[in-house]
Image: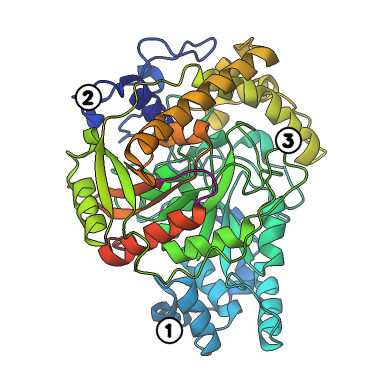
Amino acid sequence: MRNFFFLIAFIFICSCKNSKLSETKTPDVDSETNEASSDLSAISTKDFREFKVLDSKNLTKAEIWEAINPQLADFTEADYSRLKPFVLEQDITTLQNNRRGSKFTYVELTKFYLYRIRKFDRENELSLNSVIAINPNVIEQAKIKDRDFINKKWKHPIFGMPILLKDNVNALDMATTAGAVALKDNFTEDAFIVDKLKSNGALILGKANLSEWAYFFCGDCPSGYSAIGGQTLNPYGRRIIDTGGSSSGSGVSVAANFCVAAIGSETAGSILSPASQNSTVGLKPTIGLVSRSGIVPISSTLDTAGPITKTVTDNAILLDAIYGYDKSDSKSMTIENSETYYGMSSTNALAGKRFGAPKRLLTDTLYSNALKVLKEQGAEIVEIDEEQVGLPNFLRLLNLDMKKDLPTYIEGYANKNIDLRTVSDVMDFNLKDSLKTMPYGQSLFKGIANDRGDARYLERIKDTLSTNGKQYFDNPMKTHNLDGFLSINNYHAAFAAVAEYPALTVPMGYAGNGAPKGLTFIAKPLQEKQLLEWAYVYEQASKMRIAPKNYN
């Protein structure tokens, strides 16, 4: 949820047409209930340059690699250098072509990423702290993929591709911690989407670091920090450029070529933010398209998992591998797709499409340049004034959902030896060794514990937020006959969240300080195919992604 509170600021000042986004202040949250008041500075997005913690005090590099190191003993620097031109910055289609061309095996591909993570990610001058765990069985599983490949048993493009999971997604053989010491022994079964990935042939490489408890825990802390994983850093500017979050490790690991692709999760910006901040492609799907079962929650109302990748086509492939109906998820949908999400080849998907561009964003040079590219591809850009609606009690929604949803996860999906049940239980656990468990405090958890709203009040909040979110997009879409809405990074993620609309961000360039930015497309529910097609045409016309220096 990194930059989530920036979104709250945006919500409150969206009617002030002359305000600059970079100067936005976020209102304060009451320490008892997290209710928005007039000044949210205590938990606003901050420009962190000095961190209380960089390397984890609860996990060492040696511990991460203890089980897998013996299996990597035969993979040398020479092997790594030989494979680099066939793997680094390559998309899934190219990787599969290289596998068919015997440039490498799936075992070698897996070892390449493992070697690269070990080489760069922790306890060195280029460390990023983006990976929190390694699947100890992934090399053996890759051997099976190679045998299946020879026997022509692969059907999906994700087959044999090493994927990282955000560490709030349950997966066999690795603890699912949400970055918290309280869950360090939370060994579980696979989440529904992990079953989907495996059934389509993907390899689960390991777990990615995250903002602890999906950034709804500490408040006054940098994105990308967790007690288990330490401080995730941005490869485009270590300790200078924000990672975004809460899917920080997912965004960073994809940007740094530590995996083929990664799974993130979003409540309000947690995929869009790190994807855009790390020059990757991130999709927040329509809520219900992708299962949430077996994922540590914030909000059963707003949560969703989604793909983070280097390219739009890879994003479509990964989405295609994880979507599907899950009877145990109350919001899950049955989707009858006559075609796959991947396979974008049309260069005319933008022709005649009408997109709303908020006037306040036009001062951003990268955004304006992106609009020019869209126009060159046949799109019509309509400059719009934003609807003057707010999102009242947004934080109360998260408080009240997490208060009930966390115990539901622990009862149904956590390891049976986890004896903590509630947010209050976790807070008490953290107080036993606060320097190691909560160096930035746990102010948002306090707000959750102290929120006395009941189920009836929660339903009223949901109704209001859903109405306002849809009004924010639907009114200009109807007035101007728009096909979609264009934003920057996660600026409109909160509105898309409560409207339950999908959003996709794609690299659109770099600010003066080198910070990546993304052009974000937002559309009506279940229009993921259109989002992917629009983004693909823009991506191919602009070619804005550049790999981070020093990691090649």
> Of the residues shown, which amino acid type is indicated by label 3?
Tyr
Nearest to N terminus: mark 2 or mark 1: 2
Residue beneath the point at 76% across and 48% down: 188
Q: Is residue 535 left or right of residue 359?
A: right
Characterize the magenta stretch by its predominant secondary structure. Answer: loop
> Of the residues shown, which amino acid type is indicated by label 1?
Arg
Q: Is residue 499 above or below residue 459?
A: below
Mark toward the viewer: 3 or 2: 2
Alpha carbon of mark 3 to alpha carbon of mark 1: how far?
45 Å
Which mark identifies residue 82?
A: 1
In this view of the protein, can residue 207 be seen by the observer?
A: yes
Q: Name the residue that disc number 2 marks.
A: 17
Look at the numbered disc 1 and give the secondary structure of its residue: helix
In this view of the protein, can residue 123 be seen by the observer?
A: no
Q: Residues within 10 Å of mark 3 (few under 14, many from 20)?
A: some
Q: Residues within 10 Å of mark 2 (few under 14, many from 20)?
A: few
Q: Name the residue that disc number 3 marks.
A: 409
Mark toward the viewer: 2 or 1: 2
Q: Is residue 433 left or right of residue 175?
A: left
Give the total number of marks visible in the rendering: 3
Nearest to N terminus: mark 3 or mark 2: 2
Please state the extent of the stretch shown in magenta in the rendering: 522-527
